[in-house]
Image (cartoon, rainbow, N blue to C red):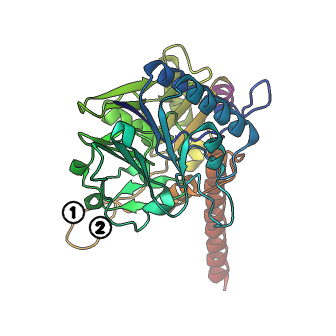
Amino acid sequence: MRLVHLSDLHLGYRQYQRQTATGINQREADVAAVFRGVIDRVIALAPDVVVIAGDVFHNVRPPNPAILHAFAQFSRLTRALPSAIVVMVAGNHDEPRSSDAGCILSLFVELGVHVVHGAAARLLKFPERSLSILAVPDLAARGHGRFVPDAEARYNVLVLHGELRGMYTESALSTERAGAAIDPDDIRASEWTYVALGHHHVFRQLASNMCYSGACEYTSSNIWGEYAEERAAHLPGKVFVEYHLASGKRSVHPVRPARAIVELPTIEGRGRSPAELAEELRRHVARVPNGIEGKIVRQVMLNVPRHVSREVDFQLLRDLRRRALHFELDARKPEAARPSSGMAAPGRRPSLVETVRESLQARPIPSDIDRARLVESGLTYLEEADRRSIGSAASAAAVGGES
C-alpha cells in the first residue's frame, strides 16, 4: 500500500507587486501552477492514500481564485483516483481564530476528502485495508499529549500539523503564525507505520518513518532561510514524499518551482565606495545563468553604512528590479561586536536594525502588502529617527556651549 504525503500548499499566497495578464498576483499564479503540476504527478503515481498535512491555503479567508483552483484540482484527484483515500488536516493558516467561523476546508468534503479541523483529533478507520489514520489538525495538536495508534489496524498513519520542540531551524522560526508545539516523546515514531508532518516548509526526515514533506513552493515569510536550509542539506529544492506502508521504502519526488530563486554571492562592503559596490553587483548579475529575468533575486552587502548604500547606482537598481520578478538589495550596516553576558565566549547581540528587520519579516500582514517594501520603509523610518536624534543632541550641545 503506497501513500503520498503533501503539506503546506499555501494556495492564495501573494507576494510582490507583479500581476499576470489576467490581473492575478504573479506569485499566487506561480503557486497555483506548481500545485496543478503536483496533482498531475500524484495522479500518475496512483497511490492508495494521499494525506495533506495542513496549510492548504495561505489565509483563513483565501481569495476566490485560490478556492476555485483548489476545488478544481482536488476534484481532478478524486475523480482520477476514485479508490484512493484522501485525508486533509487543517494547519495554522487554515483554522479560523474564532470558534464560530467556518473552516474553508469543509468545502472538500463534497469531493469525498476526509477533512479534519477544529480542536479535536479524529481516528479514521478503513478496516477493509487494515488501515487507521489519526488525523490531528493544528488546534487539536496543542496540548494533546501522547498520540496512540490503533491496536486493531495493521497500518497506522499519524497525520499532524505542528512544530516539534527542539527540531526546528532558524528558517522555521519566522512563520507568520506559530504552529502547535509538540513534544517528540508524544509521537514515538517507532509505534507508527508512518508519521506525516506539516508546518515546516523544508523537507526534513526525523526518523526512517517520520518526516516533514515541506512546502511545494517558496511561500513563507523567510524564503531565503528556506533556500539556505535546502542548500545546507543538499536537497534539490522542494519535494513531496511517497511512502510504501508495507516495505517502509521512502521516495522523494522533486518539485520544480515556478521560477528560480537566486542568492547572489555576498559582497563585503567595508571601506568600499558606492561605485565599487555597484560594479561588483554588476559582475554577480552577469554570472547568473540565463540572466535574472523573471527570477527572485537577493544581493546581500555586509558592512555598508546606510549613506553608502543609498548612493549605489540608482539606475542600475531600477533596471535590476525591472528585469527580475523581485530584486532585493539587503545592505547591512557595520555592527560592533560586544562581549556576551556570563562566562560564554564573546558574541554579538542583535542590533536594533536586525531586530526591526526580523520583526517585520515575521509580522502577520495582509496578503496584498509587499513585505520587502514594508521592511525597507521600516528601516528608513528608523534611520530618520536616528538622524533626528543626532540632530537634536547636536542642537542641545550647541545651546549648552553658548550658555
| Label 1: how many Cα within 10 Å (few below 14, some 14–19, many 20+) | few
59 sits left or right of 24 in the view:
left
Front residue of 233/37: it is 37
Residue drawn where x is 70% and y is 51% of the image: 61
Residue 268 seen: no
Separation of residues labelled 1 and 2 (CA atoms): 7 Å
Q: Quadrant of residue 13?
A: top right
**Residue furthest toward the top?**
290
Identified by mark 1, the residue type is Ala
Which residue lies under the disc numbered 1?
Answer: 345
Identified by mark 2, the residue type is Ser
290 sits left or right of 237 in the view:
right
Question: From the viewer's perspective, is residue 146 above or below residue 362?
Answer: below
Residue drawn where x is 26% and y is 32% of the image: 246
Front residue of 282/1: it is 1
Q: Main secondary structure of the magenta part?
A: helix
Which residue lies under the disc numbered 2?
Answer: 340
* Residue 159, position as x, y percentages in the image: 41, 48
Check if residue 185 falls in the magenta segment. Answer: no
* Residue 281, position as x, y percentages in the image: 52, 28
Residue drawn where x is 49% and y is 27% of the image: 280
